[in-house]
Image (cartoon, rainbow, N blue to C red):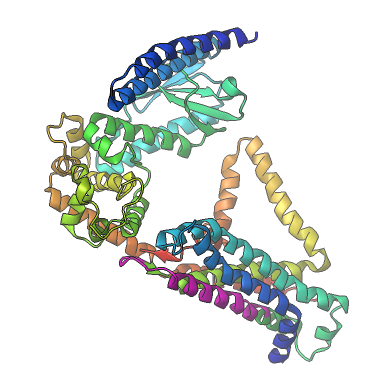
Amino acid sequence: MFAMILRTQWAWTRVLVALLALIAFLTPVFAWRISGGNDRAPGAMQLIKGLVLLGPMLGFLALFGSFVLAVYPWTIDAETKHVYPLSLPITWSRYVGMRYFAGALTLLVPALALYVGNRFAVSMITLPPLLQAYPGTLAFRFLLAALVAYSASFALQYLAGRRATIVALLLVLVPTLIFAAAELAGARGFGDAVGRFLFEWPGPFSVFSQPWVLIDV
Amino acid sequence: MSDRPLRHAAALVLALTCLTPCAAALGAQTAAEMSQRIHAMQDSLQATRARYDARRARATLPLNDSIVTDGVTVLFHAALAARDRAAVRQGIADARSLLDTRFGAGAAKLVEGTVWSIMSVAQFDGRAPTAGFVEGRVPRERSRVVGMPLRAEDVEDVVLQRAAHRLLDRAPVVAAFTAGTYDFNEQDRPLYIAQKMLALSASSVARRCAAGAIGACRTILDSHAADQWFAATDTVPPNGRAIPPGVKASVLGVALELGGTRVIDALARPQASDDAVAILADAAGVTPDSLLHSWTTQLQAAATETAAPPFPLAATAAFWCGIFLLAATRRRPQ
C-alpha cells in the first residue's frame, strides 16, 4: 500500500523535486563562484562569504518547495473529492500518515543533492588546517528545515482543506496586524515574544534561524 | 518659524572654518604633515558641527525632566511615557548588574557618573518614532538612535557601549591595539569569530597561533613585528593586515575575565609600556604567555562548541513534525 502511495507521490511531484534538487545542488557551487570575483580558484574565505549571501536562499527553498510538495497531492485528491483514499480499506488517519511519509521521503532527494553540491564546492578549494567542512551537517539542517516546513504546510492543508489558502493568508496577516498594533500601542514585547517562540529554540521554526554554515572551525 | 536662515549661517560658518585648515593643508611640505593638517581640519569641522547641533538643540529641546538612577544622571529632552522611563531605569540597572556579575563588585563604576541626554530624533530630522541617546548634558543630532517605545535591552546596550569606550579611553595603547572595538554584551561569540578569522588568515603565523602556538600569537599581536606577520610563502592581502581588530579585542575580553575589576583599575593608571599584551597581562596579574595561553585555550573551546552536531535541533524538529502530523490526521473529509 505504502509503495503504491509513494509511487503516485513521486509521479505527481517528480518535476518539482528535480527542480528543488537542481537548485539545492547549485547553491553551494554558485556560492563558491560568486564571491570568487575574478579569481580562477577562489578559496575557503570566498566560499564562506558566498554562503553568507546565498545561505538564506536554502531556507526559502526549504520553505516554499516543501509547501508545494505538501499541497499539490492534496489538490489532486480533492479534484475527485477524495473518493479514492476514502474507498481504501484503511483508516483516514493511516492514509494521511502514509501520504505524509511518502512526501517526506521525497525531501531526501534535494537534501542529497545539496550534500553532493557541498562536497563538490568543498573539493574545489584547499581548506586551511584548522577549518573543517560540514557538507553532511548543512544538508541535514536543510532536510530538517524542509521537513518542518513540509509538516506545517501538510497540517494546514489537511486541516483547512479548500480554505487552506485563506487560512494561510490569515496566519500571516493576523499576527502581522497584531504585531503592528502592538508596536503602535507601545507593546513591543509582544511581537518579540511571538518571534522568539516561533524562531528561537525550541520553537517550531528554530531550524530556520540557524546559520547555513558549510565551513567552520 | 523656518530654520533656513540658521542653516545658511551654519553653512557659512562651516565654509569659513574649512578655509583656514585647507590653506594650511595645501602648504604642507610632507605627506605626513598634509595628513596631520587634514585631520585637524576634520576635527575643526566636527567641532563646528557639534556647536551648531548643540545651539539648535538648546533652542528647540527644552529639558523636560531628569532622574538620577544607580549613579547615572538622565536628562529627558523628550516627553517620554512612564514605561520609557522605567525602561531607562531597568536598562541602566541591567548594565550595572552585568558588569558586576562578570567582573566582580565595583566594575559598575564604568557606568557610574555618566550623564545621558535623551531626545526625540523626530525633533531633528522628522524620523519617528525613535529616541536619540547622547552622553553629556547637551542634546545633539549625532546620537545613538534607538526605537520607541524604549526597551531596557536597547538602553543597556547603549550604556554598555559607552562603558567600553570609557575603559578604552583610559588606556590609549590598548585602545589602539583593539582599534577601539570591544563589546561587554558579547562573550563567547567574539572568541568563536576570532578563532575563525585566525584560521582563515592569509598569514601562516596567524594560523599557527590558532593552533595554540604562543610564540606565533605574540608575533601576530605585536604591531611592531609587522614584518614577521607573513611567512615568505604567504600571499600578503592588499591591506597588509594579518588579522582584523576584533581578534585583538578578544584578548582584552580574556584579560577582563581573568582579572576582573583589577584590570579595570589597572587600565585607568598611566602605562609605561607600549606593548598592549604586556599591559593587559600585567593588569590581569599574569604573565603575557599565560594570558595568551588562556586566550588560545578559550578560542579553541569556543570553536569546539560551535561545531557540535545539532542533536537538540533535530529532536525539536522531530517533535514539531510529530505535532503537525497528528494535527493533520484529525479532520476527515465528508
Whether residue B156 can be seen here:
yes
Left or right placement of residue A133 versus residue B2 in this view: left
Q: Where is residue A130 in the image (x, y as percent from the top left)?
A: 31, 65
**Can you give x and y, in whole percent of width and height, for residue B284 in the image?**
17, 43
Q: Residue furthest right?
A: A80
Residue B89 falls in which quadrant of the image? Answer: top left
Location of residue B318 with respect to A7 vertically, above or below: above
Left or right, A48 with reference to A72: left
Residue B208: give x, y in percent of width and height. 23, 60
Q: Where is residue B74 in the image (x, y as percent from the top left)?
A: 43, 22
Left or right, A149 with reference to B199:
right
Q: What stretch is highlighted in magenta?
A: A103-131
Q: Along the line of sight, which residue is nearer the eye, B80 or A136?
A: A136
- Locate residue B52 relative to residue B182 in the image: left or right: right
- Majority secondary structure of magenta residues: helix
Establish if B111 lies above or below B301: above
The residue located at (25%, 47%) in the rendering is B251
- Taking the image as drawn, is residue B314 in sight? no
Q: Look at 46% across and 39% down and name the residue there.
A: B153
Q: Is residue B75 above or below residue B288?
A: above
Q: Quadrant of the C terminus of chain B?
A: bottom right
In the image, B232 versus B75, the foreground residue is B232
> Residue placed at 33% from the left, 61% from the top?
B303
Q: In which quarter of the image is the N terminus of chain B?
A: top right
- On whether residue A112 falls in the magenta region, the answer is yes
Q: Who is closer to the viewer here, A201 or A66?
A: A66
Task: Say whether residue A153 is magenta.
Answer: no
